[in-house]
Each structure stands twice: as structure tokens, then as C-alpha cells.
Amino acid sequence: MLFSSIVYGPIHSRRLGVSLGINLMPTEQKICTFDCVYCECGFNTPVLHPVLPAREQVKRELEAALQQMTTPPDVLTFSGNGEPTLHPDFAGIIDDTCALRDRYCPEAQVCVLSNSTQLARQDVHTALLKADQRILKLDSAFDDTMRRIDCPVNKDLTVQRIVELLQTFHGNFTLQTCFLKGTHDGQIIDNTTEEEVQAWYDVVEQLRPRKIMMYVIDRQTPVPTLEKIARSRMEEIAAPLIQKGYDVEISA
């Protein structure tokens, strides 16, 4: 399912409420530094010279959408057909979005869903700090599992590198993890085992995020052999973190 416009919605998000989406990738293809087996947008469809929306075009369409809304959204959410922080004008677009939010819907929050791969870029890091919510992904504490689930374009990417980048926010972010199991290309995928969960707990303790979002697959995925995790199992995984005082939200 690809998003066919720059600004879409509003939609009711399981995790965020009434969300007006902002897609900084092309409307006819997915471009991402990950190629997650569970992504509702399908697999990457790379081309040599993808056409991304210009900063002014994003600003113009977002303002038009906000002017037409009779009820303000809860959030303005950067998501869409791939990794939003890949856009070369991401920082400027965040500035424009915050200004439009202040003008048309000052109670709304600016939210960015990111896979954490571009956090080493200073412009991205600075821009993310201007957002109200930085929802940053880590799907496993093990390299092999992360690569089976997220299929990073950079084959040398490690969990340790992602953790190092996440640590630069000093806990001022939401950690997002999708729990799933199944098979893909003859390999077993399961980040709900005791070994996986204990290692993930250790990473959570290193990062100490202000919030944790745990969720399961909810829509059709490009890999049909994946299974949705039962809510009871999700609650089992969340319980020790809740007992330690973490703010944990389960979408299952």
C-alpha cells in the first residue's frame, strides 16, 4: 500500500490519534534504507533518479490541507513511502511544518517515524530535536535478527551502531519495536523468544527512552508467512519494563 500524495489523511492511528500524514518520498514507489519484511508499503522499488517533492511543494500542500480541516489533527506525522529523513531538505521541511502547526493547529504535535539509520547526520539530528515526538525504531538486539527483519540496504549496519546513535538523544525519544515471527527465504524470524527479549531489555536499559511503543503487524505484509503476535505475549514482554517504571504502550 503506497501513499498516493504528499499529504494524506487524516487517519486514525493506533498509536498517535488523529494523524495528518506527510510523505516525503515519491508517491509511486518506496525508497528506504531498510526493506522490512513487514512494511505495509511493500519492498523497495529503487530507481536511479527518484523525484522527491520539493520543500515548497510540501509546505504548500500541508498548508492547504490544514486550511481545509474543520477539526485540527492530534499530530502531523512524517511517515509515508519510506524513510522521511532521507529527504535532502528534511531539516527545512521540519521548520516549515512547525511554523504551520503553530499557525493553524498549535495544540497538535509534530511527529517523525524513523528507522534510525540517518541519525549520524547533524542536520537530521538537529531537526528531530525540533519535533515533539521522535519515534525511532529498533526491532532486535541481535544483528542477525535485525538483518532478517529490517533487511538494511547497508549490509554492514550493526545493532551496536544504531544503539550508539540512539544514545545521542539521551533518552529523549520513543523507542519503537515491532514484534513478529514467521519465515522468510528459508530462515526463521522470531524476536519474541526469551533470548531475544532479554537482549532487548538490556538495550532498553542502555537507552532508557522516555516511552516504548511495542506493536505487531496489523496489515498485509510483503512476506505472507509472518504471524501476528498475541496480545497476551506482548503483555508478558512489557510487564517487567512497566514494573521498572517505563512508559510502555502496546498496540496489538
Image (cartoon, grey):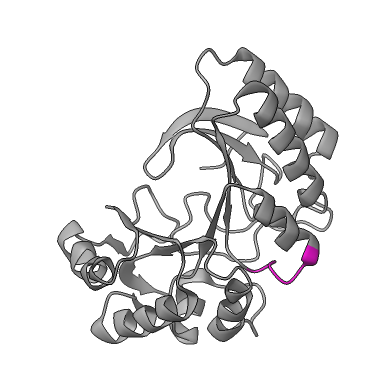
Nearer to me, 9 or 243: 243
User: Would residue 8 be found to the left or right of residue 178 on screen?
Assistant: right
Nearer to me, 63 or 155: 63
Nearer to me, 31 or 197: 197
Q: Is residue 17 above or below residue 70?
A: below
User: Would residue 238 be found to the left or right of residue 32 on screen?
Assistant: left
98 falls in the magenta region: no
Q: Is residue 235 above or below residue 15?
A: below
Residue at the farthest front position: 245
Is residue 43 something that shows in the picture? yes
Q: x, y (%) of residue 7?
A: 64, 31
Q: x, y (%) of residue 111?
A: 57, 45
Residue at figure coordinates x 64%, y 73% from the top left = 168
Quarter where residue 221 is shown: bottom left
Residue at the farthest left position: 232
Residue at figure coordinates x 47%, y 81% from the top left = 206
Residue at figure coordinates x 65%, y 59% from the top left = 32
Quarter where residue 208 is shown: bottom left
Q: x, y (%) of residue 3?
A: 58, 38
Residue at figure coordinates x 15%, y 61% from the top left = 232
Q: x, y (%) of residue 72?
A: 53, 22
Which stretch appears magenta?
117-122
Is residue 186 something that shows in the picture? no
Q: Is residue 33 above or below residue 11?
A: below
Query: Which secondary structure class fits the magenta region best?
Result: loop
Q: Total of numbered circles in the picture?
A: 0
